[in-house]
Amino acid sequence: MKEGKDTGSLHSGKLRSSFSGKVGYVLAVAGSAVGLGNIWRFPYLAAKYGGGIFLLVYLILMLTFGYALIISETAIGRMTKRSPVGAFGAFGKSFPFRFGGWVNAVIPMLIVPYYSVIGGWVVKYLFEYLRGSTEALAEDDYFSGFISNGVSAEIWFLLFSLMVVAVLFAGVKQGVERVSKVMMPLLVILAVFVAGYSMTRPGAWEGVKYFLIPNLDNFSWMTVVAAMGQMFYSLSIAMGILYTYGSYIKKDVDIEKSTGQVEIFDTAIAMLAGLMIIPAVFAFSGGDPDTLKAGPSLMFITIPKVFASMGFGTGAGIMFFLLVLLAALTSAISLAESGVSTFEDQLGWNRHKATLLMGAIIVLFGSASALGFGVLDFVSVLGMTILDFFDFLTNSLLMPFAALSTCLLITRVIGLDRIAKEIEQSSDFKRKKMYCFFMKFLAPVCIVIILLSSIASVFGWISM
Ligand code: PHE
């Protein structure tokens, strides 16, 4: 493996591989960023937390706070050539450094199990469309019936996990990336088409307005908290991924520009997904507040109704869930890969053993999440189902901590100047002043807000 050749391998082995160049890097980050977060998670949060006002808060946060954090993580990765635990360790060995590195590294390990549960739901829907169950899937209780049947949710989850672990074992990352280069554009085309169809259903226009026009009456603190968590999630920030990816790029990649491109791509897909799903909620249920607040099940409830009302719904369903599955797989693989490389680097294990451990973690936590809607439905953690709890734990508690650790590392230890120098090696850092301001003031304030709000919601002082 020579430096400079696109090996496509993202794990940190003895020889650190690198991306072929700017395009390869942007595509790899976009492939990791675009996943269930955009298509499944963003629309249900937007529907639940105020529509247009959620979108507005999300966009502002992404362009400011998110932008600064992507740049920071990528620059530290490139500077130290290490993934998070090693990168933090490069600056100090005391407890805060170790803690900062590990918080970043543990998050993907906690996300990938429940991510795979949703992945399993996608596989199930794909399978049902292939069997032609288009009408049945569109029935009101189909989804709740499916997830509360513990055995079937568990089996589909295991199937998805098996695909992820199989790819990790085979190490055919390159193949996956090639596939995703073709699939991503296809996903965009299909999304534009479905969104167009969904928006033109009778009654759907109210949904378009709800999603795009901010209404202050719908604002609540949780709008900000949810938007911030979603921003981390969707852009793969605050979970060590971008450190690792940054460590694979060479000094000629314009970090500022590629960050912008990734943000545009990721947001475009999320907005398209919003335009597919939210107008459909209005067309098929008249914007019923209960459906709007359906949460994780929203995509699985509304999209089948859209397809059932189309002439060629079965074909559309197959295409849609196939593409979502591929987007989910590429993201799940990059999440799990990050766990595997942490085990390899930090425990000195070989890839085989590291993959087995990651697989065991997925099966253990994932099964708990999958069964949380069925046989384990009596278990509630802080008033949440197990899956919701993992989502909350990672997005609302751990990621702010991870982001905070990155901010502190930069402002207290590395220094904003050194980060700026790193960026300036490949381009003149146009938004340097803005970046410094965000890192010094905006980011800490945002992080404190999200942490306090999350803690307050745990104690029931504010409601999610
Ligand atoms: N950003 C991905 C999504 O939106 C989730 C993810 C996070 C994937 C981190 C990889 C790494 O679905």
Image (tube, rainbow, N blue to C red):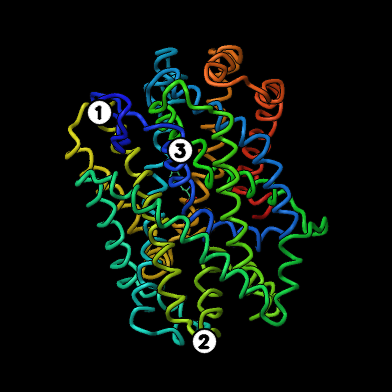
> With respect to residue 4, does 387 lie above or below?
below
What numbered label is drawn on residue 31? none
What numbered label is drawn on residue 311? 2
Percent coordinates x, y for residue 416 in the rendering: 61, 15
Question: What amino acid is found at the position of numbered circle 3 in the picture?
Answer: Val
Please state which of the two labelled residues, at mark 3 or mark 1, is closer to the viewer. 3
Residue 204 figure quarter: bottom right
What numbered label is drawn on residue 13? 1
Question: What amino acid is found at the position of numbered circle 1 in the picture?
Answer: Gly
Point out the tag, 3 or 1, that comes first from the N-terminus: 1
Question: What amino acid is found at the position of numbered circle 2 in the picture?
Answer: Gly
Q: Which residue is mark 3?
A: 23
> With respect to residue 283, does 342 lie above or below?
above
Residue for point 51% across, 35% down = 238
> With respect to residue 42, does 210 lie above or below?
below
Percent coordinates x, y for residue 222 in the rendering: 68, 51
Percent coordinates x, y for residue 363 in the rendering: 28, 54
Give how far apart the Cα atoms at labels 2 and 1 are. 50 Å
Residue 64 figure quarter: top right
Point out the tag, 2 or 3, that comes first from the N-terminus: 3
Residue for point 38% across, 28% down = 248
Percent coordinates x, y for residue 213 in the rendering: 78, 60
Locate the C terminus and report the quarter of the image it occupies: bottom right
Note whether ligand 1 is within 8 Å of mark 1. no
